[in-house]
Amino acid sequence: MTDVAIIGGGPVGACAGALLAGAGLSVTLIEPHPPAPIPPDSAPEVRVVALSRASERTLRAAGAWAGVEGPRLCAYERMRIWHESRNRTDALVFDAADVGEPNLGYILESRLLQLALLEAFTAAGGELRRCAFTGLEVTAQAVVVGTDAGELRCRLLLGADGMDSRVRAAASLSATVGDYQQSAIVARVATERRHENTAWQRFMKDGTLALLPLADGSSSIVWSADTRKAEELMALSATEFAAALARGADHALGNTQLVSERFAFPLRRLRAQRYVAERVALLGDAAHVVHPLAGQGVNLGLLDAAALAEVVAQGVRTGEDPGALGLLRAYERWRRSEVALMAGAIEVFDRLLAHGTGPLARLAQAGLASVNRSQELRRFFIRRALGTSGELPRVAR
C-alpha cells in the first residue's frame, strides 16, 4: 500500500507528488497521458502560464526549477494596465524595481512546466503509472483506487484532475459552477515593437486583453471576450484578426501578426463546497477555477500542493496517518480562505473593470491611474502579483 495516490499528472498533481515524495512518503501518480518532450528548437507553444515568485520558490523546493530554467523561460519585469476609457499613457505601471525584485514573475509553456514537475516527481522517488482512474472506495484504513490497469490501495487520495474532476464526483464532493458567458482566445503573435519584457493588459467593455512576453521575442495573447464577441473574432481571417488585436491593444506594441493557430475555450468558474472528505482531498482546478484575467490559476494550484504537502508531512512526522481527516481539514481551512480572497478580487476586477458601466465601475476604471500616484499602493499590488503576501506555505516564502 502506498501512502499517497494522486489522480492527475498536470503541474499541480506533479508538484504535490514531488513535495510529498521529497518528504519521505511513498507516492503513486496516475496519469494516462503524460506529455511528450518538447523538441529543443521548436517555436513556443500557445498554452502558457504565468508563474509568481511564490510559485518559483515552490518549484525550487520541489526540485523542478532546473527543468524550466533556460532559453524557453521569459522573466517579465513590468506590467502596464489600463482601461479603454483612459489614455494608454496613463496606464498603471508595476515595476519590479519598485520592490527591489529582479522581475515580477515568469511566462513559460504549460507543457514545459508539467514536464519539469513530472521529472522532479520521479527523481524524488515517486512512481508514475500510465493508466486511467475509474473509481474509489474508502475504508477505515485505506482508499481502494480503481484504474483500468487494476486496483491500488493508498492512505490518502488526492484529486488533481481538473475542473471536471472524477475524483470530486466519486467522493461526493459537490461544487458550484458558473458560466462567465465569455470565451478566452489564445494565440502567439509577432509584434511590430519589442515587448521589452513587459506584460500588457487592457480592460474593455466586452472583455480583457493581455499580451504576455515570450523568450523568443513573440508574445502570447489571452483575449477574454464576451461569447458573441469571441465568436466574431474567431470568424475573422488571420489578417483581420491581427488588425483587430492591434486595435484592441491600443497599438501598445504596434501592428501584430499571428504566428500560430487561434484557440478559444469557454470560461467557467468553480468552487467546491468542500475540499476534503474521508481520506480524499482536492487540489487546483478540481477545487477551484477562477477567471484567467489575473493569471493566478496555476499559482493558486501550486500553493494548494505546497500547503497540502506541508500539513501532511508535519502530521506524518508526529505519527499521524497521512489520510487523517483532521490534517485534511486543516489544509482545507487554510486554502479555502486564501483562494476566496483571490477569487473575490478577480470577480471584482472582471465586473467593474472589464464589464462595469455604472458610477462605481467608472470610479474603479479611473482609479487605475490614480494608483500610480501612491508608492505604497503600487507596492501592495506588486506583492500580491508576486504572491509574497498572505498565509504562505514555508516553501513559498
Image: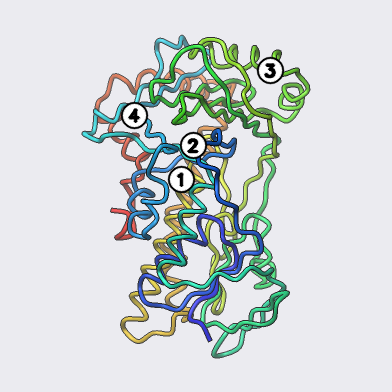
**Residue corresponding to mark 3:** 241
Tell me if residue 383 comes above or below residue 197 in the rendering: below
Foreground tag (3 vs 1): 3
Query: Which of the two discs, 4 and 1, sits closer to the camera?
Result: 4
Alpha-carbon neighbours of circle 4 within 10 Å: few (<14), some, or many (≥20)? some
How far is mark 4 from mark 1, CA to CA?
22 Å
Q: Residue at 45% across / 12% down in the picture?
A: 88
Q: Quadrant of the rendered structure where residue 103 is? A: top left
From mark 3 to mark 2, how far is it between C-alphas?
23 Å
Q: Residues within 10 Å of mark 2 (few under 14, many from 20)?
A: some
Residue 318 left/right relative to 349? left
The amino acid on which the numbered mark 4 sits, given as a three-letter code, is Glu
Mark 4 and mark 1 lie on one chain; the one further toward the N terminus is 4
Using a 10 Å C-alpha cutoff, classify the residue at mark 1 as few (fewer than 14 neighbours), some (14 to 19) or many (20 or more): some
Residue designated by label 4:
77
Quadrant housing residue 59 = bottom left
Which residue is disc 1 drawn over? 342
Q: Position of residue 112 (x, y in %)?
A: 50, 47
Q: Please say if 305 is above or below 170.
A: above
Q: Which of marks 1 and 2 is in front?
A: 2
- Disc 2 marks a residue whose amino acid type is Ala
Q: Name the residue under label 2.
A: 294
Mark 2 and mark 1 in contact (Cβ < 8 Å)?
A: yes
Real-space CA distance between mark 4 and mark 2, rounded to the nearest whole angstrom: 16 Å
